[in-house]
Image (tube, grey):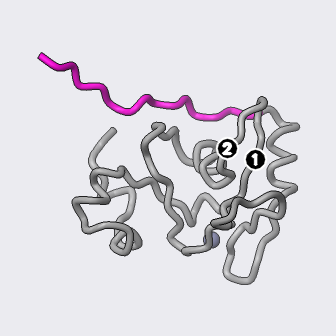
Amino acid sequence: MPRINPGKKQPKLHPDLKTLKRLLGHVELDDSGCWIWQKYKDPDGYGQVKIAGKRLSAHRVFYSIFKRSIAEGDEVDHICENPACCNPMHLKRCLPDYNRAQGGRNSRKNITDDDLPPF
Ligand SMILES: [Zn+2]
């Protein structure tokens, strides 16, 4: 019988104070409440950050620090639709399968964490 192998859960990030201050120093608040990542962004506009030698998406890092842990396959989506935004209150976790079932990318903005199936 095939073994079901769910997405590997990543531990919630607990950065030290120095790292946390560094991360927060790289965002600027705009008029809409977005925390705009000021450092390197990928071609799609998503902030990139290097932590412990690993390149990570800045918004995923902020989500994991301030909200909860995410699995590798989970997508963290922007409610504000600004890819450079790292404000945890503007981010929500989407499970890819759930996303597809809901009709794809354009329907994501209507999904909240409360709509998602439990971990
Ligand atoms: Zn935002």
SS of the residue at dot 1? strand
In percent of the image, x 30 and y 43: which residue is there?
A: 118
Picture layout, residue 108 above or below residue 47: below
Would residue 28 be visible to someone looking at this image? yes
Q: Residue 49 carries which label?
A: 1
Verify CB contact (< 8 Å) between mark 1 and mark 2: yes
Position of residue 103 relative to residue 52, above or below, is: below
Q: Inspect the image, locate mark 2, and give the three-letter code of the amino acid beneath it.
A: Leu
Which label number is shown at residue 56? 2
Q: Does the magenta stretch include residue 66?
A: no
Q: Where is residue 77 in the image (x, y as percent from the top left)?
A: 49, 61
Q: Where is residue 84 in the image (x, y as percent from the top left)?
A: 68, 66
Upstream in sequence: badge 1 or badge 2: 1
Tell me which segment is drawn in magenta.
1-15
Where residue 107 appears, x then y in whole percent? 33, 73
Q: Is mark 2 on a helix, strand or loop?
A: strand
Q: Quadrant of residue 119?
A: top left
Looking at the image, which residue is at 55% across and 74% down?
81
Residue 2, magenta (yes or no): yes
- Mark yes or no: residue 85 visible: no
Of 34 and 38, the residue lying toward us: 38
Q: Residue at x 87, y 55 (%)?
A: 25
Tell me which residue sits at (22%, 59%) in the image: 101
Res 1 label: none
- Name the magenta segment's main secondary structure: loop
What's the amino acid at mark 1? Val
Farthest residue, direction front: 43
Q: How many labels does the image show?
A: 2
